[in-house]
Image (tube, rainbow, N blue to C red):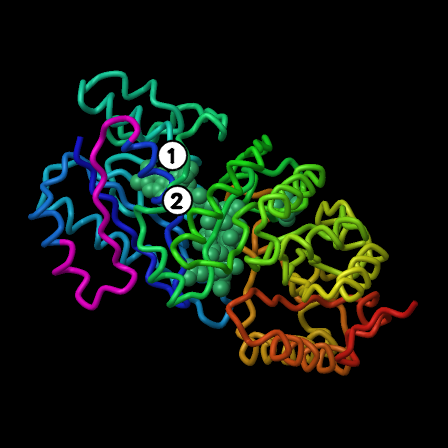
Amino acid sequence: MKILLINTNRMKPAIAPIGLDYLADSLVAAGHEPYMLDLCFASDVTADIGRAVGDFAPDVVGITIRNTDDCYFSGGAFFLPEIREVVQQVKTISSAPVILGGVGFSVAPLAVMDYCGADYGIAGEGEVALVQFLDAWKRRSDIDKVPNLLWRNGSRIRQNPVRYIDLDKLPPRTRTFVDNPTYFHEGGQAGFETKRGCDMNCIYCADPVSKGRRVRLRSPQRVVDELKALLSQGIDYFHTCDCEFNIPDTHAREICRAIIDGGLGERIRWYAYCSVVPFDAEMANLFRKAGCVGINFGADSGSDYMLYRLGKSFRSEDLIRTAKLCRQHGITFMYDLLLGEESSISANDPQAQVARQYLTRVWQEVKAAHPYTGPTTPLHIKDFTVGKVSGDQAQQICQNIIRGQQAYGGGTYNFVGGLSKCMIDHGWVNGTFDPAP
Ligand code: B12
Ligand code: SF4
């Protein structure tokens, strides 16, 4: 079948739609014909959609949703209205069914499908589910047996059970469907996955929702082959697309060894999202030798109480140990923090008002991000309130966060401020965060 795949993510710096690269390999292997319409750099979205639908005459149109919003408190960009317009335009000019997917879709599939008015959706991974959907659609039967599928039954949206796939049984990842060299030129890095899923219990996190709680690993050799496929296109800077690269740590070590044994350690550079634990000297050393140059740790807070409340598996002493190890091994690192803690103080407390003013400044000047908690996570964003911190402390932390982001290069990273006594004790307020021995 002919399937038009539309990338709706226009946010810059540009991030290639890796999900569509992966889907295309599976679609081609199953004998289908995928065609790409990438709206990321389009100057006239409406005209491009009209042309692609008219020229390709698809049997099915798939639309990927990476971000529902920019997750910036001060930015506040909400992308679903423009994506809904894309859905509506396609439905006006074509009789092909519209199916949604992507990680942004998967964090709240029912709500997004309802809002966008699409015919179908696939929550979670799409390689097997989309192929099965195309087969079912061709036969016009067994729609209710397609895993991960959302479909309309009268006025209701039904969701079939989720099935996890063995990642090593998927066809090799060629990375040729998406124009990765252009994305590399525009955005500076390409993504790659070493596994899917996270079985940890952080109460705000959408990753177990969108990727599943069951961790599924890819064989290190397959990951190296994929990196080589990208390297042959001139791409040598990467970012992991795992929830946390170092969980489970044995797999992260195996991936690093395979990269080193495959002769790539000196030829590529990569960044990773990691958990603060597990992290030890051997891991830091392996990461560095395998080409890791930067790690974004989900630190969240320096307060043991808050770490406990957030469901984190580490405590403040781990933050300090991990920071030291990164410094010792020459790995640039940053700590993502969650701004605002559970408050026991009343809204009229003058102390809280001063703190709020400074926090507002943090949002405005740093354009800090807020965590996406979504309706499907145990904790929703509305449960976060400004924490108990004095005005002076808040001002100092604010300055430190700004300095920290400038030092990092002012990139697109989430830099969410956290307020806690422990961080203050350990030097965050001085702008140095150099943990004492
Ligand atoms: C790695 C990553 C980054 C890296 C990307 C590096 C790179 N070069 O690729 C960096 C650090 C740059 C980054 C930046 C941002 N990110 Co980010 N990122 C991720 C992360 C961890 C992985 C995304 C990924 O590539 N997954 C791997 C691919 C293969 O999976 P996938 O896209 O989901 O595709 C599969 C399925 O969804 C499905 N599918 C996909 N498309 C389609 C289409 C159809 C039709 C179908 C049927 C199926 C289907 O099949 C695919 C294969 O199974 C996710 C969290 C997560 N665990 O997924 C957050 C995540 C996507 N990021 C998020 C955000 C907010 C951002 C930023 C906006 C942050 C910011 N304010 O700057 C920016 C946006 C940048 C941009 N231009 O878009 C949020 C989005 C939340 C939301 N509700 O919108 C997420 C979910 C994290 C979170 N939990 O909050 N990010
Ligand atoms: S924050 Fe990290 S460790 Fe916690 S559930 Fe999310 S991905 Fe897993």
- Name the kind of residue labelled 2 in the image: Gly
The picture quadrant where one finds residue 4 is top left
Q: Which residues are magenta?
A: 29-49
| Residue 179 falls left or right of residue 276 | left
Please state the horizontal and vertical placement of residue 411, each as a whole percent of the image.
Answer: 53, 72
Q: Which x, y percent locates residue 166?
A: 50, 26
352 above or below 175? below
Q: Which residue is mark 1?
A: 126
Looking at the picture, tell me which residue is in the foreground, 272 or 44.
272
Q: Residue at x 40, y 51 (%)?
A: 66
Name the quadrant of the N terminus: top left
Q: Nearer the viewer, residue 273 or 221?
A: 221
Confirm whether residue 111 shows in the render. Answer: no
- CB under 8 Å between discs 2 and 1: yes
The answer to whether the residue bearing label 2 lies less than 8 angstroms from the nearest atom of ligand 1 is yes
Image coords of residue 418 (percent x, y): 70, 66
Disc on res. 19: 2
Rendered view: 297 above or below 219: below
